[in-house]
Image: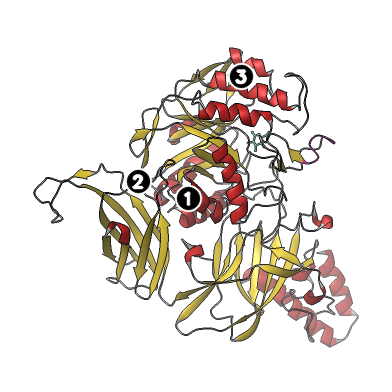
Amino acid sequence: MKHLFNSLVRIIVSAPRTIALFLTGAAAFIACSAWAAPAPIILTGADRRPALSLDGDWAPIVDPYFAGIRNNGFYLNRKAQQGDPFPTEYDFSKAPKLKVPGDWNTQRESLFFYEGPVWYERDFTYQPKEHTRVFLHVGAANYKSWFWVNGQKVCEHEGGFTSFNCEVTAAIHAGGNFIVAAVDNTRREDNVPTLQTDWWNYGGLTRSVSLIEVPETFIDQYDVHLSRAPETKLAPHGNDFGLIGSLYLEHIEGWIHVVGGKIGDKVKVEIPELNSDGSGVLDADGRAKFLLVASNLQRWSPETPKLYKVIISAGQDSIEEEIGFRTVETRGTEILLNGQPIFLRGISIHAEAPYRTGRANTDKDAETLLGWAKDLGCNFVRLAHYPHDESMLRAADRMGLLVWSENPVYWALQFDNPKVLAKAEQQLDEEIGTSRNHAAIILWSMANETPNNEARTRFIEAEAAHARELDPTRLITAALLVRGEGNTKIIDDPLGKSLDVIGFNEYIGWYEGHPESADTTQWRVEYQKPLIVSEFGGGAKAGLHGGGNERWTEEFQANIYRHQLGMLNRIPQLRGMSPWILMDFRSPNRTLTGIQDEFNRKGLISDQGEKKQAFFVLRKAYQEKTVGKPE
Ligand code: GCB
């Protein structure tokens, strides 16, 4: 406002040309707020498409007052152009570069605590092909982002942990092109997540960026999964499918959605190794269902993480996937994987990069983190507190780790604000739409530690219903808070009614009592459903030693784990655990100098890869299977 006032004063005292320029600038600003570019689209298996990588050096302008949008009719060009509305003073080419993918906080000391807008620019050459559409694929941009190609707005997006795709076909041309992006990680009350979290608000183009080419009519989303229906044993003399023999037949089913397809167009799914294929035809919504019969399928499990090549095609378009097939369901208080009860020996993981810190985003980060989880004896990981990078999910599929994937509905959002619900649902659309074909994912988590009140319950019930509609094949969970009465811990949050599996967090021995307090704690659980203790733990600085009752020592943390494991074994419907947390991670809340230094130190491993004593306590329990009900 103040700026507008100053501008008006300047206009009144200056020449008519300035008035014209001011109006152009103001119109451009209004246009920016009012003109919505087409919404980005969701692509399943975007990483399986031919792509031109735009990773590498991008030129940034740090713009704390967002002057690039307000004053100058945007930083749309590589540098200020003649005729720009106000005398402009920017030139991307002069800026020292930032790496993409990457958060800006760990790349430049002055940006360590920075929250606000940063502009990015990148040049590239391109040769358009006929009958091809081109999408700018953004792995993640935290939190809000806007994109222009050759000065033309191509999209904007909200949400910092999911991928999205902006069509650039009409904006791109043969030869030299450039992209300008603005990314703003300002925390706001009506964001998802909201103002308070316990992790670093890493800003920027934190995951890979590329250009993806697809035919004019193309597959955007698909779902290929094993049917939960029991397998069919064939009669020895023939059957509906014309096969003879005593084979086990299983059904692989799903759907394919085609953009630009016509009713009746055919789609096809093939699994060459199983000698199996199936087809379907598009309905009025561009979706085709299919069913495949597979014999002698080897099911995916943590012990045998078998992935099959699956070819999905529609008209000119085709994608080659790697998909595992398994079922997951609950029966009473059991979790059944492939029909058999399973205990989830897990660990929670943040997307914090091992050794270098910052946002994890490479195959190597994923392999290191999940490699440590395997070494710990895990068959399960809770990917907290937001959807992780595709490379984590691909690695989990390959390495045989079951996954809890989480929507960033964390602590106290504006639960009574319908716009906030819409944002949470949009992030679910993107999370589920992009990752629904990972055999590893068994649980969609709706939220973490939310206050028990009616608005919250309504909000998460709506979210859960939305998730079930998007994906009826997986289990819905959330990490709940527990309440205490004397020595008894009670799980009776009404939200439990709308969950398939109940997660709960507790910090006995750290935020309350002593490690030994766990020995006398009783549990009352109001739900006959499977339970997962989604967090417990305590802080320790790697290399700091002392007695079992000295806080911050490795011994103290190990002591918490010993007593917790004993206590948890006394909860009859416990079906899994994901203690907090695999590796130390940055959090601005953790200010204890010399110990925390802006790291949450509850990791079993330090950010530099040092394993603490508690790692070995948990590993022993997992390896010897002294936790959980025998499977
Ligand atoms: C919690 C939160 C987690 C925190 C953790 C802690 O309950 O869910 O995000 O980091 O506690 O360390 O306090």
Give the residue furthest to the right.
Answer: 13
Q: Distance from label 1 to label 3 (Cα)?
A: 34 Å
Q: Distance from label 3 to label 2 (Cα)?
A: 36 Å
For badge 2, the amino acid type reads Arg
Q: Which is more N-terminal, label 3 or label 1?
A: 1
What's the residue at 16%, 45% (across, down)? 246
Q: Residues within 10 Å of mark 1 (few under 14, many from 20)?
A: many
Q: Does 338 appear above or below 22?
A: above
SS type, badge 3:
helix
- The answer to whether residue 597 is magenta is yes
Q: Residues within 10 Å of mark 2 (few under 14, many from 20)?
A: some
Q: Which is more N-terminal, label 2 or label 1?
A: 2
- In the rendered structure, the answer to whether residue 292 lies left or right of residue 416 reads left
Place of residue 436 in the rendered image (x, y in percent of width and height, measured from the top left): 44, 53
Q: Which is more N-terminal, label 2 or label 3?
A: 2
* Quadrant of image for the C terminus: top left
Place of residue 377 in the rendered image (x, y in percent of width and height, measured from the top left): 53, 35
Place of residue 132 in the rendered image (x, y in percent of width and height, measured from the top left): 47, 80
Q: Distance from label 1 to label 2 (Cα)?
A: 13 Å
Q: Quadrant of residue 610?
A: top right
For badge 3, the amino acid type reads His
Is residue 304 in sight in this rendering?
yes
Q: Using the image, tell me which numbered label, if any, was put on residue 563.
A: 3
Q: Of discs 3 and 2, which sits in the foreground?
A: 2
What's the residue at 71%, 53% (across, down)? 202
Residues under numbered marks 1 and 3 in contact, where contact means CB atoms less than 8 Å apart: no
The part of the chain drawn in magenta is 593-598
Q: Using the image, tell me which numbered label, if any, was put on residue 299.
A: 2
Residues under numbered marks 1 and 2 in contact, where contact means CB atoms less than 8 Å apart: no
Place of residue 97 in the rendered image (x, y in percent of width and height, measured from the top left): 77, 68
The residue under label 1 is: 398
How many numbered discs, if any? 3
